[in-house]
Image (spheres, rainbow, N blue to C red):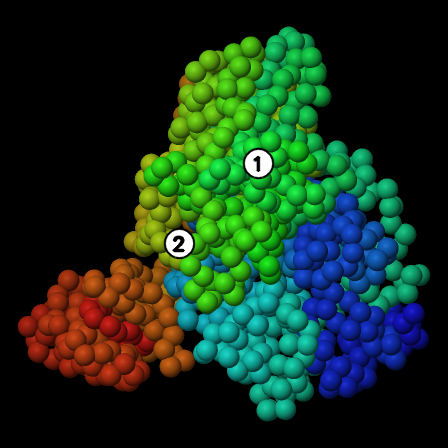
Amino acid sequence: MENQNTPLWDASLDINERLDWLLEALNLDEKCRMLSTLTPEVARLGIRSTYLGEEAAHGVEAKHDRSVNWGAPKPTTTFPQPFGMSQTWDTKLMEKMGAAVGDEARILYYREGEHGGLCRWAPMAEPERDPRFGRTEEGFGEDPHLGGQMASAYIKGMRGDNPNYIKTAATLKYFTGYNSEDRPLRVSIDPRSFYEYYLEPYRRCIIEGGAEGVMTASNAINGTPALFGDHLQEVLRKEWRFSGHIVGNECSLEELCQDERFSDREKTAALAIKAGVDCFADEPEFVEAAVRGAYDRNLLSMQDINQAVRRSFATRIRLGMFNKKEDDPFANPDESLLGGSDHAALSRQAGREAIVLLKNEEQILPISPKEKEKIAVIGPLANEWFKDWNGGIPPYRISPYEGIRDAFGEDCVTYTDGKKRLCLRCGERFVCLTQEGRLALGSRSEAEEFVITDWGQGKMNLQAASTGCYLTSVDENGKLFANRSEAFGRHVKECFCVEMLSDGRFRLTTWRGRDVYWDSEGMLRAATDEQVGIGWPGENRALFGIEQTWDGTARAVTLASEADKVVIVLGTNPVINGQIGQDREKYGLPSAQIALFEAVKKVNEQVIVVVVSNYPHDLMPLQEAKAILFTPSGCQELGRAIADVMSGSYNPSGRLNMTWYSSFEDLPAKNECDIIRTRQTYQYYRGKKQYPFGYGLSYTSFVYDIFAVEQEKEQLKAVLRVRNTGNCDGAKVIQIYAAKEEASLTRPDKKLVGFAFVMLHANEAKEVTIKIPFRELMIYDVITESMMLSDGGYRIWIGEDADTQAQIIESDGTKRPAQAIVCLEGDIRIRRDFANITGAWLYDECRNVRISKREGVQVVCISNKAQEAMMEYTMGDNDSLGSELHLKLYAIEGSKLKITINDKDSQMFALNTQGMIQEVCINLSEEMAVWGYVDEIITLKLSMKGVMGISYFWFE
């Protein structure tokens, strides 16, 4: 039992008094240990061991099988993946789910102490601009307004409403620009994209939601690792007044030290701490050694260390971790809430609201259970419930088939997974199982039958039919076993890759790309690292033939032909072909799933497709289906939620939170973060798409008969009336968009500025008010380097989705667009003073550039060296021009620079600083004499060729 008779445990003291005492009492070594998220006990001071970590993306993650081994999993309520949560567009529901997470985290904390974390690494506030991102499931979609609102509501629920203490501390992930699992991830983000898009959801979550922690990303932004980027101090601490703690991403310090530029761990740790990082999710011994070494080398001061310890322990005190029971406002929680019926009902409601109805031809849905129609439930995901990396273990899980069977009756529902079964042959022998589950070669009579799940891209799971266990590989010795109950892990060792040969045979490789072969004893193995390292020739590499024993497609066709309607459940596994550490390579569903759909469709046209996934997909091959439902994974009530929507007991209300592009080919490079110039997300994209942002169908219909926008102080007020004109109850997601009427700069074509989730009974009307702060209409001005409300007119409208404007239907039946034009007295851009030093990255337009660092200086350099690059700077003051242009730049031989002023070009100036940052002066006297008069307001263009980059420039 810790010593509770210290000032640390005295709740009557001010938090700063408690922290002052703590910092005075801790010695240097103890302080260095406190910069890890897993801190040790210091009994003499009453400090218990605590852990500022664990997940809560869609429920309390208590698996205890990740970075620490704290025993068996603890069942907790699981909700839909965050990607699905945001498809509800229901902030009140989000807050309820956050509160449930807070309650269950508290219960586990009181049961297990430090093993039940009160500080949770959730939500992920990063806007998801690219559907190829492997961790799309963790986020809230592509829009910073929607994502920020939904994440903020979740945080409010987690935090609770006690004015002095926090029920659960939410830690935002991953700050920022983190939209790819490529390593090393180095991105270039221009100032406008950074402030208008990437930072916006974080700002909302901190200022409005009250997030207690921020986790840095694992990438580098404009040449600086996010672990010690300037934005930690300049934006988080100074601009947003963030007082919580900042934590480095899991293992980010150790990973960064593997880069030769940052291999000095003491120096790297010092850079992070001085930038504002307060603790690291790395091995405690590594952190302690790095911090102590940095102090001993005078890279860190005692004040630096004290500041970090103060912030992380302030979070612990605000959580009540050092309060006696009588001073703990959250003591004695209702333990029945942990995985209980109240939270189960909440999970079911979230599962319903997260479902998006993408298509409903001939109103095939809903299906009334009273009709007693025969329904065939088919597909590889029909009777599956997949675990994911950031979720917990639910007390139970309902698969789609189970939910549909229970809703429509066992007598009316048939099922098959549509998977093939086969035996594997190596030459004249067959693959069989030993008593201990190892794979060996034997006779045909001994052959094991394997159930194949094909996930596309050559990846599959093999499941022994006799035991139901999955084939897996043991990396250390290469042994292959069929002894796993599920395919799951950070690295899914139950996933094998198939290489088909021209003669119909195939090779198998493990998740690590190791060949499967047979050894001298006739046992199947995978090559080990040692074998590969010594040039293992693979002379015994297994070449497999197939003997199919069960035609899953044929069975599916039979059931489909006997049914009135077919429900085919397709989708993805959340840990295969896209997860932590792996971006998506393909947009479509696995070809085996498409083939199954096509076979079923030939014998029964009444096909309803349910796609269970956490990403947009190419669904064009499924367009002959009568109906398509899209639902996320992760919800323990998944099957019941699907059945509720299918049966009409819940009217689908989900709306898409991302643009569903027609093809991955429509997207720029994954690391291209400039959403403005590359026209990414619904705000800028003008190409073809399958479904727009905000899209979703309903079983009922809604009309608007009032829409007006009024101007108030610092905000607009949109007032509307919506009516449910159908014959069933339903929720309407009201979406308000805005655009600038006339703009000299590239601005969003449309931008979500407000939304509301409104439940309406049949024929019920409600008046709704949505407030739009002027902040929603601002852009980042690169001249003043601040957010700015531009002067002039703005169009505000109601959208059915991002591409479809709603209509107002007047009492006489006439229609008009549901829009209003408002004129705002905002700011007028000031002129640039080119006599002042200007950062090259403060451009208005650009082409073929990236922002990076060289010799510690930020530069704008050429992205593709084979093409010309250009930066454009508008609104320049003619009076600030001089005959000499000074630049700080680097260039190698062959590089050239052209200066253009109001479309008047200079010659191409040859530059060579031998790759070093130097000041260069270019005399433009001759050019200016030829150009003659230059307009009062000028536009300057700098065009680069070769290998070069510009940091600053000014005229004299």
* 759 or 789, nearer to the observer: 759
Secondary element at image label 2: loop
Where residue 729 appears, as percent x and y from the top left, is 63, 21
Kindly give the residue lying farthest to the bottom in the view shown.
Answer: 297
Numbered-mark total: 2
Question: Residue lying farthest top?
Answer: 371
Q: Is residue 311 above or below residue 570?
A: below
Residue assigned mark 2: 670
Picture quadrant where residue 647 is located:
top right
Picture coordinates of residue 199, whole percent (x, y): 50, 59
Q: Is residue 401 above or below residue 240?
A: above
User: Dot 1: within a 10 Å radius of its alpha carbon, few (fewer than 14), some, or many (20 or more) residues?
Assistant: few
User: On the image, numbered disc 1 is attached to which residue?
Assistant: 443
| Horizontal arrangement in the rendering, residue 190 relative to residue 245 (left or right) | left
Mark 2 near mark 1, Cβ–Cβ under 8 Å? no
Q: Look at 58% across and 78% down and name the residue there.
A: 269
- Which one is in front, 127 or 286? 286
Q: Quadrant of the N terminus?
A: bottom right
